[in-house]
Amino acid sequence: MTEINSVTTLTQDGDVAVVTLNSPPVNALSANVRDGLFEGFKQAIASDAKAIVLICDGRTFIAGADITEFGGAMKGASLPDVQAQMENSPKPVIAAIHGTALGGGLEVALCAHYRVAVPSARLGLPEVNLGLLPGAGGTQRLPRIAGVEKALEMMTSGRHAPAKEALAMGLVDEIVPEGQLKEAAIAFARKIAADGKPLVKVRDNNTKLEAAKGHPEIFADFRKANARKFRGFLAPEYNIRCVEAAVNSASFDEGLAVERKLFMELMMGPQSAAQRYYFFAERQANKIPDVPDDTPTRPIAKVGILGAGTMGGGIAMNFANAGIPVVIVELKQDALDRGLKVIRGNYERSRGAVAEQTETRMGLLTGSLDMDAFADCDLVIEAVFERMDIKKDVFTNLDRICKPGAILATNTSALNIDEIASATKRPQDVIGLHFFSPANVMKLLEIVRADHTAKDVIATSMKLAKQIGKVAVLVGVTPGFVGNRILAQRQREAQKLVLEGAMPWDVDRVLYDFGFPMGPFAMSDLAGLDIGWVKEKSNGATIRDVLCELDRRGQKTGAGYYDYDENRNAKPSPVTEQIINDFIAKSGRNPRKISDEEILERCIYPMINEGAKILEEGKAIRASDIDVVWVNGYGWPVYRGGPMFYGDRLGAGKVLAKMAEFQGAMGDDFKPSALLESLVADGKKFSDFKR
Ligand code: 3HC
Ligand code: NAI
């Protein structure tokens, strides 16, 4: 065995050389890895071996470029040099793939002459999710091997294709048995050499591109079909342009030059910076300073859910989807039946494998009207009405019924979890698990740590969140926790703006253009204006009251803030406009013209300021955790990183100056937080904040 460098070895098995990478955690293409590959292949080519296998140790094949190196000075061998070394090798090169071959990893594999993979391997070009495009020839090689349509779909979705699909696409030449990758790849390589098979260079095969030549409609149709999904993002469009260049350029190298230029443009731009930041923010959120990775966890083999309403049903689905049995308890049989029926309906309406597994998943759910059914559960999550007296009563009962060590969780959206925990004799076992609606779809889970929550309860909850496919963020007890507390700022300003002269559709348009999926008024119409509205108590005190009194309760009644046609398309409503104008007249004020800039600043700056207060009070561990909450739970556009990242982009000084200006004009809703002031004084950023 030759040790090429600290992450690369070269061995020989008979007449086959094997270059092995071992650079945990994911064999990313750091300078060291590139150097190892370059030198390893050089020596393998110079050896008497007849073929060369590239394989990785650890959990995965190369998972891409090393993202931590982006933006820094380039060191070591360049990736194109490594790729040229492989592709121009006079001996067949075979990439042996397990885990994930992603981004630069797949681009390296595409410079091998053949690829073999185990059935569990997945391959993809996920650069788009980092606001980028594949910058090492992937945009030119993937359409050559998989065809233009498939390449467009793979590159703009960033999807990881399973080995079987990769085989059908031609990305992989052979699937080999799980656990036997190395032996099988060596045998494959030996046979290729013995049979004198050609050294296939993906770059030379133009057949699939020819088929797309003279068909610009392929691209036009693709853009049109995905316009909604791509709105606001630069990277999908740039990926498409690269595939267009592959089809329309006179040579591979000409297409490669387009790829290079557009890659650099994205890399230097603000969107990719935000999306790369967000990639690490999401992973950072798993790290809790006083709950280290090796904190023991409690086994969760069975889950109880109390309440089969909107949230309880959705929460139950998460566990059934992960194969964990669930018992759901309701007050009355009809509520239980209704809840289970909704779950079944959700499964049946799903696509593909999920729908096929409806019976298996339903089989994991049992219903009961008796809380004693929770006696053998390891975790119980209550999702009953949002009232402190009911929650406390429920927790008193859970304390009595549940076995020692069971985790007792509440899905409350705003109540004080310390107070809820005080109803038990085991507050160390009580935690908030704040799911978002629809709970079977939304990725975000706010895990709420109360005063006495035990560390192993936190560690177990974080681990479980991963198991059920959620992005978890640990937050503290505060009204509305992190997400809703910040949302309240935006909602307040949106309402005030309307009473000063902006129309709901003006506010919505500005926030939509900023990148939110919809504005606050469209959102209210979708959710139903009558949530929390009580007819008997309604006295026309708010615009919402008046709308509900007119039976304008949102989309479901065909009218709310907006008017809706039969396809639920929204139109600004003259009725709403009149109601608003009447309100303003009654208040004795004159409506004024409010600029888009003011709308945006009034909605967004107080959110950033509230985030700062949350940090100051220790209700979030770090600024990036707040961003993870807002990107996953509230549709903050990921290409703007999140409210705190955005605040850093603007600069704390600018945020403070605007808050102070608004405070002078409009009062203490805009009072700057102490943290904001101290960051400005110290010339620091939100991302520098550490408690
Ligand atoms: N560069 C640097 N670090 C990386 C990395 C990368 N490409 N991919 C993962 N990591 C790090 C993570 O930050 C994490 O670090 P931590 O333990 O300190 O938090 C660690 O590796 C493990 O990652 P995950 O927690 O995400 O592990 P999973 O097993 O859940 O997922 C994965 C593994 C699917 C490979 C996932 O990490 C992933 O999607 N990685 C990014 C893949 C990617 O985007 N590749 C393209 C990069 S851009 C590129 O290649 C440009 C090229 O075209 C020139
Ligand atoms: P819901 O009204 O749809 O469902 C509540 C269910 O609990 C009802 O089916 C009711 O019969 C049942 N229930 C009430 N008391 C019970 C008891 N003592 N024992 C057994 N079942 C009981 O309410 P929803 O929307 O599901 O909310 C539940 C909880 O989740 C609330 O705390 C709410 O604040 C929180 N939440 C709601 C979100 C939403 O968007 N709806 C989002 C996040 C949290």
Image: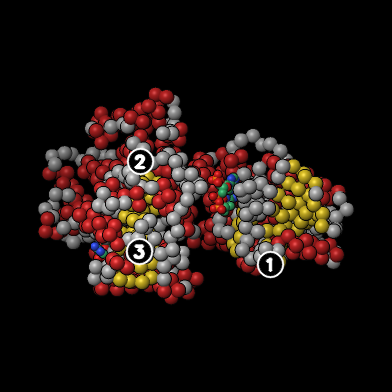
Vertical placement of 672 versus 79: above or below?
Answer: above
Which kind of residue does numbered mark 2 sit on? Answer: Lys
**Dots 3, 1 in contact, CB < 8 A:** no
The CA distance from mark 3 to mark 1 is 39 Å
Q: Earlier in the sequence, mark 3 or mark 1?
A: 1
**Element carrying mark 3:** strand
**Element carrying mark 2:** loop
Residue wearing tag 3: 304
Vertical placement of 486 versus 145: above or below?
Answer: above
**Element carrying mark 1:** loop
| Of marks 2 and 3, the one in the foreground | 3
Which kind of residue does numbered mark 3 sit on? Answer: Gly
What numbered label is drawn on residue 11? none
Residue wearing tag 1: 177
Q: Residue 138 in the image: state x and y as whole percent.
A: 65, 53
Quarter containing the C terminus: top left
What numbered label is drawn on residue 619? 2
Q: Residues within 10 Å of mark 1 (few under 14, many from 20)?
A: few
Q: Is residue 536 visible?
A: yes
